[in-house]
């Protein structure tokens, strides 16, 4: 059983939103760093082979931006994402670190190489030969891409653990069904981001005339041509997803569908512009347009990351940890013992709780709901249950995984569930209702009946054994 | 805990503890350069001296300004490894302390981003034309940011040790359970960074002195004579040596006071079989650093043998300090749970993969340095 961790209150925001914000910024910067390495190698090669003499100016200018943005913000948000993950779901990041600590350590060795090769180029490129500079940039690009390679294995495992569920083999977990499509897709995204930022950089180099800028822009656009493969890779990735997750994205969840469409739409617009305008027609692109396209790429990244995070519901690691940090195999025990029996942390987010039951309910809310919901802010429980009467609320929460299949099963006793409902009703009443409602035996029996009816398993595996489930999900490899 | 750390433990725990301690030492070396360096720059800005060239323009300050952004990058990168292994060994303690500190812990990230950019500002030539108060403010700002980060790490570590206080801390929101203990531990580490920074400064000074032509040319612009030049180097050497002695002595005093604040059980562990050898190693290496620094303080350039001696003594001292830090932590932790965590993690594959790529990337990193050296 996972230890009980304290949960912080973020006011009207739920911790999941904080996580999303940090994650999107980090992914965007990290992908720029990876693509930037590839673009710099290309331009260094253009310069040293005499294909484009002004490319040298670009390499020097671009690398300064890469260092100032990617080395600083990218590296720091990388650590930040680790800290934020702990704030949001300590059991999830703990499980990921536990299973893949040597993979993470391997990634760290590549990150170290990336930093050293990058700084060697940054400090000394003016004093080195072209060949040495290309070697350093090549090492930088290789290390940056390998960082992506390792981290991609861990991240894709969260949604598509595949046959790892049965074998628990590191290789099965790392090379999971989502690994390859995700890796190729992300590599193309990296190159696109780098090319778009390249277009902005070209526009701010003062010593270039218009035709030189156009030549460089068209060269940078070469890195966007692999976007042609995006629909194919996107389709492959969708196919590698578990059926239920795919259904959220393709219409099952309006929010997820919306973000998916934003991502697809923005990518389509960027890809069309890059291929038709920059590649075939050799158009010029000014700084403002390039910035606009970059913003669209940020939108596409944000949408894609939202979909990736959201489609894992009700898990953060499929079949291993639920979004609230509770493990599937602990639900039955928590139904028997209670989910807050071991919670030593007092309720601090409410100042005056009128009764012991409501206090217990507040604790249950914190333990099971607070990661993804607030009471009255974003994704508020009060609003989501607004149209339900008390009995409906009891049944719907007792059968939560059937009420909403992307929710985990309720993992507590009947009394805890009833107390949670009392707490929700108390907040709904603008915290006016002061009486301590007794809980009748009949109510508890009804709730127990509903809990038993729903069972302790999530909606997607109701009645399916773990090995059958693993075989089913692994077969998509 | 009946044998010298980490030998008394089962293999998995001893293995992870050793890796943790060694990676932590690498991080501490780079962190010390940045923190100690920022304090040096603050001192040099506040007290520019009466010489023709202000202290901020003298060799050590110039080297620090030039290398601190890279050192910070290195410190953060090197910090990832111990951060990874601490999550294997002390997951519950580390995560709970993170959560109890909440936004006060998260704010470390934006502070580090700000100070990272400030270091690039410090490095830029433009600040030479800034008014003195502004330059002093910048130097103080950088040092304050680093001290704040050090404070947060210390608070986090102390909080992670004291499980019985967690509910109270969560209720009150006061993350500092004992201000004295925190201040003493923080002071120990801050003072301990000074000899490490001095040592790295001495190595850099030696390298700079050997690149005479370049240095001559640069200095010729400000009209420094060769005699003045020699004098300046010997002064900087002396300052670094004195700083090394002062840092070691003050760290020792603060560590002794910190020791007096520790629980009886923890003190017994430190002076008992688990920590005694490391305690002796720590004291001996500290004495070696002090004696070497005092005896060679008047040289204008340090001999290679002196620097190698100081480096060995300093590294041994850091390993000993990091080991004692773990003895303190393990005495207060649930040893059965920590042992089980390590044993479970030991079963997970991937170590061979790590080893292969670690060797390969160490080779590639060396290659990068060789390529640059050949310029």
Image (cartoon, coloured by chain):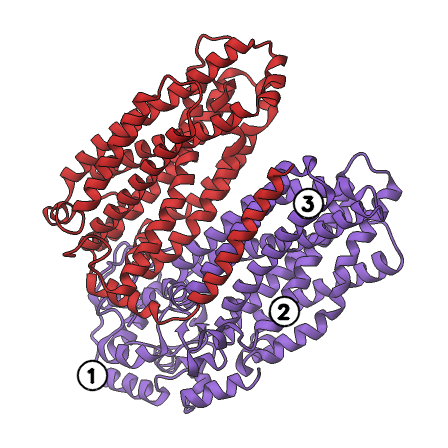
Chain colours: A purple, B red
The residue carrying pointer 2 sits among few (fewer than 14), some (14 to 19) or many (20 or more) residues within 10 Å by Cα, namely many
Label 3 chain ID: A
Say whether disc 1 or disc 2 marks the residue closer to the N-terminus.
Answer: 2
Residue B72: x and y in percent read 48, 39
**Residue with the mark numbered 3:** A132
Say whether disc 2 or disc 3 marks the residue closer to the N-terminus.
Answer: 3
Question: In the rendered image of this protein, does residue A255 appear above or below residue B332?
Answer: below
Please identify the quarter of the rendering in which residue B124 is found: top right
Q: CA distance from mark 2 to mark 3?
A: 43 Å
**Residue with the mark numbered 2:** A260
Residue B339: x and y in percent read 24, 64
Image point (43%, 11%), residue name:
B49
Task: Name the front one of labels 1 and 2.
Answer: 2
Q: Mark 2 and mark 1 in contact (Cβ < 8 Å)?
A: no
**Residue with the mark numbered 1:** A441
User: Is A169 situated left or right of B9 in this image?
Assistant: right
Label 2 chain ID: A
For label 1, the SS is: helix
Residue A215: x and y in percent read 85, 48
Question: In the rendered image of this protein, does residue B61 appear above or below residue A291?
Answer: above
Q: CA distance from mark 1 to mark 3?
A: 79 Å
Image point (49%, 88%), residue name:
A471
Q: Which of the numbered marks, if any, corresponds to residue A457?
A: none
For label 2, the SS is: helix
Task: Name the front one of labels 2 and 3.
Answer: 3
In the image, B182 versus B175, the foreground residue is B182
């Amino acid at each position: 059983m996972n230890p009980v961790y304290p949960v912080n209150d973020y006011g009207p925001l739920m911790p999941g939103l904080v996580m999303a914000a940090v994650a999107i910024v980090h992914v965007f910067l990290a992908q720029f760093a990876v693509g930037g390495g590839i673009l710099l190698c290309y331009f260094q090669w253009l310069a040293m082979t005499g294909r484009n003499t002004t490319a040298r100016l670009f390499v020097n200018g671009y690398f300064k931006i890469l260092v100032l943005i990617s080395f600083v913000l990218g590296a720091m948000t990388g650590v930040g994402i680790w800290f934020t993950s702990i704030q949001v779901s300590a059991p999830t990041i703990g499980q990921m670190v536990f299973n893949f600590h040597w993979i993470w350590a391997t990634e760290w060795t590549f990150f170290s190489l990336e930093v050293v090769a990058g700084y060697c180029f940054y400090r000394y490129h003016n004093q080195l030969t072209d060949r040495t500079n290309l070697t350093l940039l090549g090492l930088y690009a290789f290390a940056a891409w390998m960082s992506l390679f390792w981290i991609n294995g861990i991240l894709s495992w969260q949604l598509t653990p595949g046959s790892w569920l049965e074998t628990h083999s590191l290789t099965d977990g790392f090379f999971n069904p989502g690994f390859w499509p995700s890796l190729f897709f992300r590599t193309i995204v990296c190159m696109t981001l780098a090319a778009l930022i390249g277009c902005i950089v070209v526009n701010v180099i003062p010593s270039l005339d218009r035709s030189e800028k156009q030549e460089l822009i068209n060269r940078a656009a070469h890195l966007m041509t692999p976007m042609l493969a995006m629909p194919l890779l996107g389709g492959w990735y969708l196919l590698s997803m578990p059926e239920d997750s795919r259904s959220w994205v393709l219409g099952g969840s309006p929010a997820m569908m919306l973000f998916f469409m934003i991502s697809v739409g923005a990518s389509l617009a960027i890809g069309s512009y890059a291929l038709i305008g920059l590649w075939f027609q050799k158009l010029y692109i000014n700084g403002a347009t390039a910035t606009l396209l970059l913003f669209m790429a940020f939108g596409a990244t944000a949408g894609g990351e939202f979909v990736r995070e959201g489609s894992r519901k009700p898990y953060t690691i499929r079949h291993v940890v639920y979004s609230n940090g509770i493990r599937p195999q602990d639900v039955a025990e928590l139904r028997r013992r209670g989910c807050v029996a071991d919670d030593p942390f007092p309720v601090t987010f409410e100042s005056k709780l009128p009764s012991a039951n409501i206090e217990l309910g507040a604790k249950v809310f914190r333990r099971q709901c607070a990661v993804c919901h607030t009471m009255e802010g974003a994704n508020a429980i009060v609003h989501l249950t607004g149209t339900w009467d008390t009995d409906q609320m009891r049944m719907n929460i007792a059968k939560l995984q059937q009420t909403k299949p992307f929710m985990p099963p309720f993992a507590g006793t009947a009394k805890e569930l009833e107390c949670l409902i009392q707490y929700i009703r108390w907040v709904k009443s603008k915290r006016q209702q002061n009486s301590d409602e007794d809980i009748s035996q009949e109510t508890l029996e009804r709730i127990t009946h509903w809990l038993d009816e729903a069972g302790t398993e999530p909606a997607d595996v109701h009645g399916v054994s773990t090995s059958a489930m693993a075989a089913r999900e692994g077969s998509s490899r | 805990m009946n044998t010298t750390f980490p030998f008394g433990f089962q293999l998995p725990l001893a293995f992870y503890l050793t890796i943790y301690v060694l990676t932590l030492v690498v991080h501490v070396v780079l962190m010390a350069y940045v923190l100690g360096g920022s304090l040096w720059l603050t001192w040099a800005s506040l007290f520019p001296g009466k010489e023709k060239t202000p202290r901020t323009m003298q060799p050590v300050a110039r080297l620090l300004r030039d290398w601190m952004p890279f050192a910070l990058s290195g410190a953060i990168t090197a910090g990832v490894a111990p951060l990874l292994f601490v999550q294997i060994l002390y997951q519950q303690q580390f995560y709970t302390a993170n959560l109890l500190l909440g936004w006060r812990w998260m704010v470390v990230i934006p502070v580090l981003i700000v100070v990272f950019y400030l270091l690039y500002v410090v490095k830029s030539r433009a600040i030479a034309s800034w008014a003195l108060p502004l330059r002093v403010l910048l130097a103080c700002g950088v040092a304050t940011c680093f001290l704040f980060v050090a404070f947060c790490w210390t608070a986090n570590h102390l909080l992670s040790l004291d499980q019985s206080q967690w509910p109270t801390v969560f209720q009150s929101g006061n993350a500092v359970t004992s201000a004295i203990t925190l201040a003493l531990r923080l002071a120990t580490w801050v003072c301990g960074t000074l000899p490490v920074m001095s040592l790295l400064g001495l190595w850099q000074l030696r390298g700079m002195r050997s690149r005479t032509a370049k240095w001559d040319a640069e200095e010729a612009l400000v009209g420094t004579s060769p005699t003045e030049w020699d004098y300046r180097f010997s002064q900087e050497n002396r300052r670094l040596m004195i700083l090394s002695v002062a840092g070691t002595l003050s760290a020792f005093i603060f560590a002794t006071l910190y020791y007096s604040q520790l629980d009886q059980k923890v003190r017994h562990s430190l002076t008992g079989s688990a920590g005694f050898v490391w305690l002796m190693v720590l004291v001996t290496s500290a004495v070696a650093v002090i004696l070497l620094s005092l005896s060679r303080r008047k040289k204008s350039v340090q001999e290679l043998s002196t620097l190698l001696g100081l480096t060995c003594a300093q590294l041994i001292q850091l390993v000993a300090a990091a080991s004692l830090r773990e003895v303190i932590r393990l005495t207060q932790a649930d040893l059965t749970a920590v042992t089980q965590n390590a044993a479970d993690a030991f079963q997970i594959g991937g170590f061979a993969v790590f080893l292969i790529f670690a060797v390969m990337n160490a080779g590639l990193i060396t290659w990068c340095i060789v390529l640059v050296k050949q310029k």
